[in-house]
Amino acid sequence: MLGRFREGRELNTDRFTPEKKDHFTFGLWTVGNRGRDPFGDAVRPHLSPIRIVEKLSQIGAWGVNLHDNDLVPFGASATERDKIVNEFKKALDTFGMVVPMATVNLFFHPVFRDGAFTANDADVRRFAIQKTMGAIDLGVELGAKIFVLWGGREGVEVDASKDALEALKHYRESLNYLCEYVLDQEYDIRFALEAKPNEPRGDIYLPTTGHMLAFINTLDHANIVGVNPEVAHEHMSGLNFYHGIAQAIDAGKLFHIDLNDQKPGRYDQDLRFASENLKPMFYLVKLLEESGYQGPRHFDAHAYRTEDEDGVWSFALGCMRTYNILKEKARQFTEDKEIQALLEQIKKRSQTDTPVLRNYNRHNALALKEETFNVDELASPGLQYEKLDQLVTELLLGVRTSDATRLGATEAVASA
Ligand code: GLT
Ligand code: MN
Ligand code: MN
């Protein structure tokens, strides 16, 4: 099917083509990544924020996110800042793009070499707060409703250099102060804390989403602070991202999400969404779609260093298309009669509800203590998860027919 008109060309579209209503966003720093790494220089030219807004809009993204310094250079005067911001706002308007999230760069400048909110030097800590308040003002001016804080430099290489308890106190003090600032200004913006175990520091404080969730409960205004988990960061720690997201949703704290991918046990790769872990990302998309998550689907990833600008747009389109394809697969999962029948069978074979556990009283506690369980019988049935997982695998590989009640290859093999 021929679809949208972009840059003078009709492009092929299909049902996975991203649209604004999908709420896909990218950071300026993601598609703007020039391929610089610790071993090699930039391989792509600088893309201006305005060019990024235009191109992202053309390929179906809904919005763009930014650090203060992705748009306004560090140390720019107030006049320079206003000029840049006004031009950027015009571009957003022209290309129908929004800025749902903003953040602050507290990691690039050498002043943050030993941290920002957790730096030993109190002046550095106060400068970090000043810079963050300015970045919040910028975010609010651009319409952002979420302010991400990723503590890239909040950590150590040498534990002797910083008291970890003191660092946590400083971290808390800073977040409390920033919450007060937002409330005092009556800004309609909430914080989302992003965890990462290491890189660029040897160790970063609050290394996983679980640590962040626990820490949030110690803040003065925990109600306006949630999390921004990133696939790659939790996978660096060897964790199941889908489980972490379920916990964040359960806590009412999934304010934002950074979608990308990561091979296990490596540096932070920020790969194209689901380029490595198809099945785990399928369960993630299924969860986001079915749990009623309302936030942006944000991609914090970048193109391989092998790519030129065209490759960057292929990368961005790939992130969004794969999300939509996995969303379609999640729908197929719920409509697949064989999968659903198997799930029903699995459920039926065992008691699934435990009303007594929701209503403790001494009487039922005593009764439960005295109940006799036939543990051998409870332990005996096979659970058919092999079959279930193979069905999911075949669904993802695209070999299940629309008439999923048909005796499929799995059953034919199983009964042979
Ligand atoms: C940096 C980091 C990302 C964070 C960004 C927000 S900056 O690129 O690697 O994971 O989300 O500060
Ligand atoms: Mn990352
Ligand atoms: Mn991120």
Image (cartoon, rainbow, N blue to C red):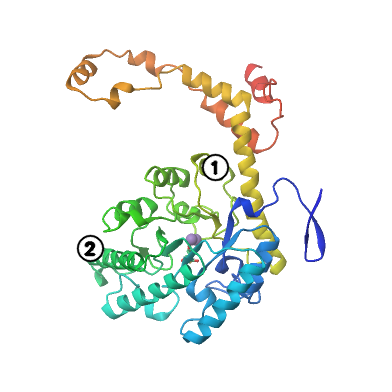
Q: Which residue is identified by label 2?
A: 165
Q: Nearer the viewer, residue 366 or 379?
A: 366
Q: Which of marks 1 and 2 precedes in the sequence? A: 2
Residue 312 can be seen, yes or no? no
Q: Can you say whether 347 is above or below 127 in the image?
A: above
What is the residue that sits farthest to the front in this orientation?
186
Residue 55 position in % (x across, y down): 68, 66
Q: Secondary structure at mark 1?
A: helix
Residue 335 position in % (x across, y down): 62, 29
Residue 134 position in % (x across, y down): 41, 75
- Report the side of 333 relative to 183 (left or right): right
Q: Which residue is identified by label 1?
A: 289
Residue 353 position in % (x across, y down): 38, 22
Q: Nearer the viewer, residue 132 or 282?
A: 132
Query: Badge 2, how many Cα within 10 Å: few under 14, some, many 20+?
Result: few
**Between marks 2 and 1, how big is the CA–CA gap?**
39 Å
- Report the side of 152 relative to 34 (left or right): left
Q: Can you say whether 127 is above or below 93 in the image?
A: below
- The mark lying in front, picked from 2 and 1, is 1
Q: Nearer the viewer, residue 340 or 72?
A: 72
* Image quarter of the C terminus: top right
Amino acid type shown at disc 2: Leu
